[in-house]
Protein backbone atom coordinates (compact mmCIF):
# COMPACT_ATOMS: atom_id res chain seq x y z
CA UNK A 1 0.00 0.00 0.00
CA UNK A 2 1.25 3.48 -0.75
CA UNK A 3 0.12 7.08 -0.66
CA UNK A 4 -1.65 7.85 -3.99
CA UNK A 5 0.12 11.22 -3.95
CA UNK A 6 3.41 9.37 -4.43
CA UNK A 7 2.27 7.85 -7.74
CA UNK A 8 3.44 9.64 -10.88
CA UNK A 9 1.89 8.54 -14.20
CA UNK A 10 4.54 8.02 -16.86
CA UNK A 11 2.34 7.71 -19.91
CA UNK A 12 3.43 5.49 -22.79
CA UNK A 13 6.68 4.14 -21.34
CA UNK A 14 6.85 1.31 -23.88
CA UNK A 15 6.56 3.74 -26.78
CA UNK A 16 9.15 6.06 -25.25
CA UNK A 17 11.52 3.14 -24.72
CA UNK A 18 11.05 1.97 -28.29
CA UNK A 19 11.81 5.46 -29.59
CA UNK A 20 14.98 5.71 -27.48
CA UNK A 21 16.25 2.36 -28.77
CA UNK A 22 15.59 3.44 -32.35
CA UNK A 23 17.62 6.64 -32.11
CA UNK A 24 20.38 5.63 -29.66
CA UNK A 25 22.70 2.71 -30.49
CA UNK A 26 24.04 2.48 -26.93
CA UNK A 27 20.51 2.22 -25.52
CA UNK A 28 19.62 -0.35 -28.18
CA UNK A 29 22.60 -2.47 -27.14
CA UNK A 30 21.65 -2.01 -23.49
CA UNK A 31 18.05 -3.07 -24.14
CA UNK A 32 19.27 -6.16 -26.03
CA UNK A 33 21.40 -7.11 -23.02
CA UNK A 34 18.47 -6.59 -20.62
CA UNK A 35 16.21 -8.72 -22.83
CA UNK A 36 18.76 -11.57 -22.74
CA UNK A 37 19.10 -11.34 -18.95
CA UNK A 38 15.37 -11.38 -18.16
CA UNK A 39 13.97 -14.64 -16.83
CA UNK A 40 10.33 -15.35 -17.60
CA UNK A 41 8.31 -16.71 -14.68
CA UNK A 42 4.76 -17.87 -15.40
CA UNK A 43 3.16 -17.00 -12.06
CA UNK A 44 -0.29 -18.15 -13.16
CA UNK A 45 0.98 -21.72 -13.45
CA UNK A 46 2.27 -21.81 -9.86
CA UNK A 47 0.21 -23.75 -7.33
CA UNK A 48 -1.91 -21.36 -5.26
CA UNK A 49 -0.92 -18.19 -7.11
CA UNK A 50 -4.41 -17.37 -8.37
CA UNK A 51 -5.93 -17.66 -4.89
CA UNK A 52 -3.13 -15.55 -3.42
CA UNK A 53 -3.57 -12.95 -6.17
CA UNK A 54 -7.33 -12.67 -5.68
CA UNK A 55 -6.92 -12.47 -1.90
CA UNK A 56 -4.54 -9.53 -2.40
CA UNK A 57 -7.09 -7.57 -4.44
CA UNK A 58 -9.24 -5.03 -2.70
CA UNK A 59 -12.75 -6.07 -3.67
CA UNK A 60 -15.40 -4.18 -1.70
CA UNK A 61 -17.81 -6.45 0.15
CA UNK A 62 -15.81 -9.56 -0.71
CA UNK A 63 -16.68 -11.00 2.69
CA UNK A 64 -19.71 -8.87 3.55
CA UNK A 65 -23.08 -9.73 1.97
CA UNK A 66 -23.44 -6.34 0.24
CA UNK A 67 -25.30 -4.70 3.14
CA UNK A 68 -26.53 -1.64 1.22
CA UNK A 69 -27.30 -3.30 -2.11
CA UNK A 70 -30.95 -4.02 -1.34
CA UNK A 71 -31.68 -0.31 -0.91
CA UNK A 72 -30.03 0.60 -4.22
CA UNK A 73 -31.16 -2.03 -6.74
CA UNK A 74 -34.71 -2.22 -8.11
CA UNK A 75 -36.78 -5.27 -7.05
CA UNK A 76 -36.82 -6.80 -10.57
CA UNK A 77 -33.05 -7.18 -10.41
CA UNK A 78 -32.93 -8.40 -6.82
CA UNK A 79 -35.61 -11.04 -7.38
CA UNK A 80 -34.10 -12.65 -10.49
CA UNK A 81 -33.80 -16.43 -10.46
Image (cartoon, rainbow, N blue to C red):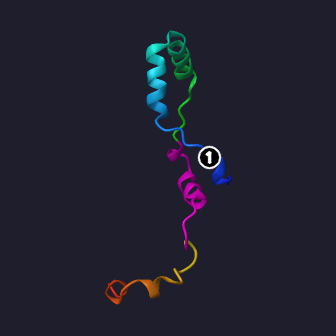
The percent coordinates of residue 27 (x first, y second) are: 54, 15
In the rendered image, the quadrant that contains the C terminus is bottom left
Q: In the structure shown, which secondary structural element does the residue marked by tag 1 occupy?
A: loop
| 10 Å crowding of disc 1: few (<14), some (14-19), many (20+) | few
Left or right: residue 19 versus residue 52 is: left
Residue stretch rendered in magenta on the structure:
43-61
Q: Taking 80 as reference, is 21 above or below it? A: above
Residue at image x 47%, y 18%? 21
In the rendered image, the quadrant that contains the N terminus is bottom right
Q: Taking 80 as reference, is 2 above or below it? A: above
Q: Nearer the viewer, residue 47 or 52?
A: 52
Residue at image x 58%, y 74%? 63
Residue at image x 57%, y 78%? 64
Left or right: residue 77 versus residue 31 is: left
Residue picked out by circle 1 = 7
Q: Nearer the viewer, residue 70 or 38?
A: 70
Residue at image x 68%, y 53%? 3
Q: Inspect the magenta stretch and tell me whether residue 71 lies in it.
A: no
The percent coordinates of residue 77 (x first, y second) are: 34, 83
The percent coordinates of residue 66 (x first, y second) are: 51, 80
Q: Inspect the magenta stretch and tell me whether residue 56 lies in it.
A: yes
Q: Quadrant of residue 80?
A: bottom left
The percent coordinates of residue 48 (x first, y second) are: 57, 54
Amino acid sequence: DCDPGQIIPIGNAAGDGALVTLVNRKKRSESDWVARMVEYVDLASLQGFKDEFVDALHIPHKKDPFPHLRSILPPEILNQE
